[in-house]
């Protein structure tokens, strides 16, 4: 399967998770069969333009706009459309990522300070 098919599959799966939708619910909203949604989410084959359009329209109707191109992926999700359980997990994951980044930055800064001190001390000698 091509990159476009894989991206569409990831978008559909992620969007469904954010919305708390089942494959059947997405299929119904898009006017497609569950088998088609399973195929798209699995990245099997290359979905036709009608299928892609139907899925994008169904997601948009639930507040998620998705646009994917060969080298660019963009997904916009209004926070009020996210399943509350998922929203808590996303907020936790974001907080964890920020904490990990802060720790990395602190470690980097400490290393830089030590390198500058070492350099300064070697110039004094």
Image (cartoon, rainbow, N blue to C red):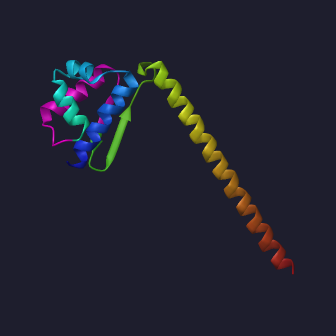
Question: Foreground residue, 28 or 34?
Answer: 34
Q: Residue at coordinates 29% horizontally, 42% vertically from top-left? A: 7
Q: Compared with residue 1, is residue 79 higher up or lower down, i.e. above or below?
A: above
Place of residue 45 in the rendered image (x, y in percent of width and height, measured from the top left)? 15, 43
Most extreme residue toward the right, as rendered?
A: 125
Question: Foreground residue, 43 or 4?
Answer: 43
Q: Compared with residue 41, is residue 109 higher up or lower down, i.e. above or below?
A: below
Place of residue 46 in the rendered image (x, y in percent of width and height, measured from the top left)? 15, 42
Left/right placement of residue 25 relative to residue 95 reads left
Residue 51 appears in which quarter of the rendering? top left
Place of residue 111 in the rendered image (x, y in percent of width and height, measured from the top left)? 71, 62
Left/right placement of residue 1 relative to residue 122 reads left
Left/right placement of residue 16 relative to residue 54 reads right
Q: Quadrant of the C terminus?
A: bottom right
Q: Residue at coordinates 59% horizontally, 35% vertically from top-left? A: 95
Instruction: Read off the magenta span.
Output: 44-67
Place of residue 18 in the rendered image (x, y in percent of width and height, measured from the top left)? 40, 26
Q: Residue at coordinates 46% horizontally, 25% vertically from top-left? A: 86
Queried whether the magenta region covers residue 60, the answer comes back as yes
Q: Residue at coordinates 35% horizontally, 22% vertically from top-left? A: 63
Residue 36 appears in which quarter of the rendering? top left
Total labels: the figure holds 0
Most extreme residue toward the bottom, as rendered?
A: 125
Queried whether the magenta region covers residue 38, the answer comes back as no
Q: Compared with residue 115, is residue 15 higher up or lower down, i.e. above or below?
A: above
């Amino acid at each position: 399967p091509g990159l476009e098919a894989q991206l569409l599959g990831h978008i559909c799966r992620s969007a469904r998770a954010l919305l708390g939708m089942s494959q059947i619910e997405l299929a119904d909203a898009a006017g497609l069969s569950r088998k088609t949604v399973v195929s798209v989410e699995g990245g099997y084959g290359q979905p036709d333009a009608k299928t892609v359009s139907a899925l994008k329209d169904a997601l948009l109707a639930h507040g998620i706009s998705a646009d994917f191109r060969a080298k660019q992926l963009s997904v916009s999700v209004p926070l009020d459309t996210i399943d509350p359980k998922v929203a808590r997990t996303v907020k936790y994951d974001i907080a964890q990522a920020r904490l990990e980044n802060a720790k990395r930055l602190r470690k980097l800064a400490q290393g830089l300070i030590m390198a500058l001190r070492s350099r300064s001390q070697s110039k004094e000698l």
